[in-house]
Image: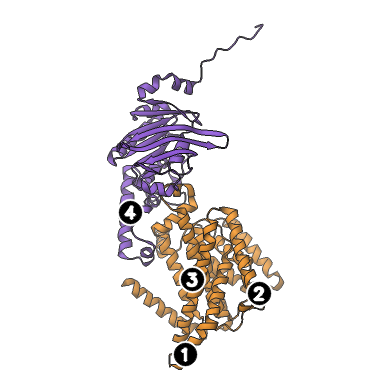
Chain colours: A orange, B purple
Amino acid sequence: MKQLAGLALILGVLGILNFVLPQALNPYFMRVLMLCGISVVLAVSLNLINGFTGQFSIGHAGFMAVGAYGSAMFSLHVGAGWVRTLESAGAPEAAAQGLALLVALMVGSVLAAIAGYLVGLPSLRLRGDYLAIVTLGFGEIIRVIITNVDAVGAARGLPGIPGWANFFWVGLAVVAVVVVSRRLANSTHGRALFAIRDDEIAAEALGVDTTRYKVLAFVISSFFAGLAGGLFAHYNAYLHPNSFTFLKSIEVIAMVVLGGLGSISGSILAAILLTVLPEALRSAQELRMVIYSLMLIVLMITRPGGLLGNREISLDFLRRRRSAGRA
Amino acid sequence: MNPDVLLEVDRVTMQFGGLKAVADLQLEIGRGELVGLIGPNGAGKTTVFNFVTGVYAPTVGRVLFEGRAIQGLRPHAIAKRGVTRTFQNIRLFASRCCRDNVLIAAHHHATAGLSDALLRNRRFAEDERGMRDRADELLGVMGLTEWADTRATELPYGQQRRLEIARALAGRPRLLLLDEPAAGLNPQESEQLMRLIEDVRRRFELTILLIEHDMKVVMGICRRIAVLDYGIKIAEGTPDQIRSDPRVIEAYLGEEVTVPRAKGS
């Protein structure tokens, strides 16, 4: 009951913001805000693999691409038809588009989750660098396939995707990935993931099915990467394989590492920082990427454990900090 | 099959390339026993633990637990059947607190599934509360209550050894394998620990196989001891029999050699 009330509250707040924000902010700030939201979903989801479970995946852009193209193809060939039918039957525009978007996002996410399962399975015998290379290979294979399949636009890209994603949906995705991560972390399943990160041999000897949990981490993580991809597709209205190179994966890894491996709030903070920073530095023109890289280096040197290390910012944490400060 | 035998190591050979770490080992452990497995460094004691817990599959031979073959099963599957262990070189979950370390090992007794955890329903809350209570109880038994919320690696060394045992108990084993639990402890600490192990065995109706490098430590609590040397069981019996066995003395102290006098001196 309490949970349902919380959900209603979140939906309400997001609905209102969705109405207010586009009028309060200029389109450029709105775009940066939306990209921040998508980055947060990507970083928090990758944190499940790289942070919680301690496995090193560089294939996140691949899962994102599966979700992006999967959902886009669904909307182009099925969803758009639904919206026309619903609207001609008198349904309100937002409801018809929302429904079609929701189904499209689920299609993309589930496809990405399946991809995560397939990549997860054979990679489980591998550790560290070897797993990293397998996931890197996966990401590149996806990109090369997309570049060569005409049905998804090949190297020309895929235009004309309905732009149904708005602040409401991106916000909802952020809430979903954060809630799932937090609830996972504070449960026996999350503890099993941490155990694998800390000492895989001990985890296995004490009854944790490490194979099952590594696959689980991959499946949940790639589901949300697919969700982020779907949102990106329906916000950008155009997809190109170059958006999903391994540099994109590296960018997400940078967010997770910078935020502090395993810290959900750290991933959120770093995702926002690394999305806003390149925009804020636009005035520096050709020095932009130099400053960006320098800031990354300085941050990692001064805070080697990441912005938040292994900690979380929560109401509890802030309260404790305040009472500790007073004492 | 004798129902009183909990674990039977049936003629197991463990070969790594050209090295026979354990050769043709026959060992039976009865329900409720506390058996010591001793031997000099490199005698193959830990290898025995590794093939019993599934880290390795034995090259030849069978391992029977409660009459069923478990050799070649994955370690987590063997843990679920009721065999857990501690590690000689402490392997705690470094980033977690003591309670979490114990909770992780209770993992396969959780009744709430992933969906319960994500929905945070009543089933999850009850399950989690039950596991926490039991973890706190185990920490209490091992004298670690005050450390429950401390990170495992911040514990003093002796407490880390105890936490390893608390963690192994969380899986509700019927057979507990302790790999040099007293390593690095001073004589008083190690005697205390041995008494605690005996208490734990009674309290939880456990069967324990205890590896020890130092013979003196196990003599006090084990009524039966097996001695390994170069992967071969060279003796088995009561502490008194072991103490006076010439092969054991030889393994520990070396063969008596007569040094030939150098010419001309």
Which is more foreground, mark 4 or mark 2? 4
Q: What residue is disc 2 on?
A: A282
Q: Residue furthest front?
A: B1
Q: Nearer the viewer, mark 3 or mark 2?
A: 3
Instruction: Describe the element under mark 3 as helix, strand or loop.
Output: helix
| Gap between marks 2 and 1 measured at Cα | 44 Å
Q: Is disc 4 in contact with disc 3, using a CB cutoff of under 8 Å?
A: no
Is the residue under label 3 in contact with that under label 1 (CB below 8 Å)? no
| Whether residue A27 can be seen here | yes
- Are discs 4 and 2 located on one and the same chain? no
Residue B130, which numbered label?
Answer: none
What's the CA distance linking mark 4 and mark 3? 33 Å
On residue B131, which mark appears? 4
Type of amino acid under label 2: Arg
Mark in front: 2 vs 1? 1
Q: CA distance from mark 1 to mark 4?
A: 53 Å
Residue B12, percent from left and from top: 45, 35
Is A301 above or below relative to B195? below
Amino acid type, label 3: Val
